[in-house]
Image (cartoon, rainbow, N blue to C red):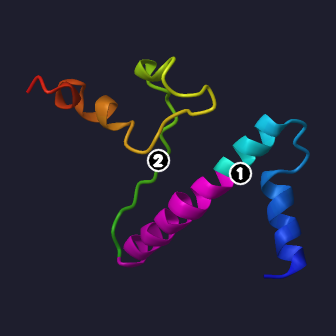
Amino acid sequence: VTAAVVDGLYNEYVGNADSPAQVRDSVLDALGDIFFVFSSIEVAKFHRDAGNPVYFYEFQHRPSEVEGVLPDFVKADHGAEIAFVFGKPFLAGDV
């Protein structure tokens, strides 16, 4: 990895952060892209190239149940969309 690449990544994610909270949020964005987004895009391209329709979405709605449980900077965790897609009864054991 060259210094130019590191500088570019730093500028893309951290840029002109004014506070530790902004740096934290930027690092979390970078890690999310590295571990989830980049690989998801790669898989989507393989499906597209095979002639299949591909739909890509990003869920960002913060569930009301996490108020007071998770820090404010946490929006939607991995899997948080399940309650919204299938309904809460599937998560509450009321099935």
Magenta stretch encompasses residue 2: no
Residue at x 67% of width, y 56% of height: 30
Mark 2: few, some, or many residues within 10 Å (few <14, many ≥20)?
few
Residue at x 87% of width, y 50% of height: 15
Please provide the residue range marked out in magenta: 29-50
Magenta stretch encompasses residue 38: yes
48 left or right of 35 in image: left
90 versus 48 height, above or below: above
Residue at x 47% of width, y 47% of height: 57
**Residue 54 percent location from the top left of the image:** 39, 60
- Indicate the quadrant containing the C terminus: top left, top right, bottom left or bottom right: top left
Gap in Å between the C-alphas at discs 2 and 1? 21 Å
68 left or right of 48 in image: right
> What's under tag 2, amino acid-wise?
Tyr
13 versus 95 height, above or below: below
Residue position marked by numbered label 1 in the rendering: 27
12 left or right of 78 in image: right
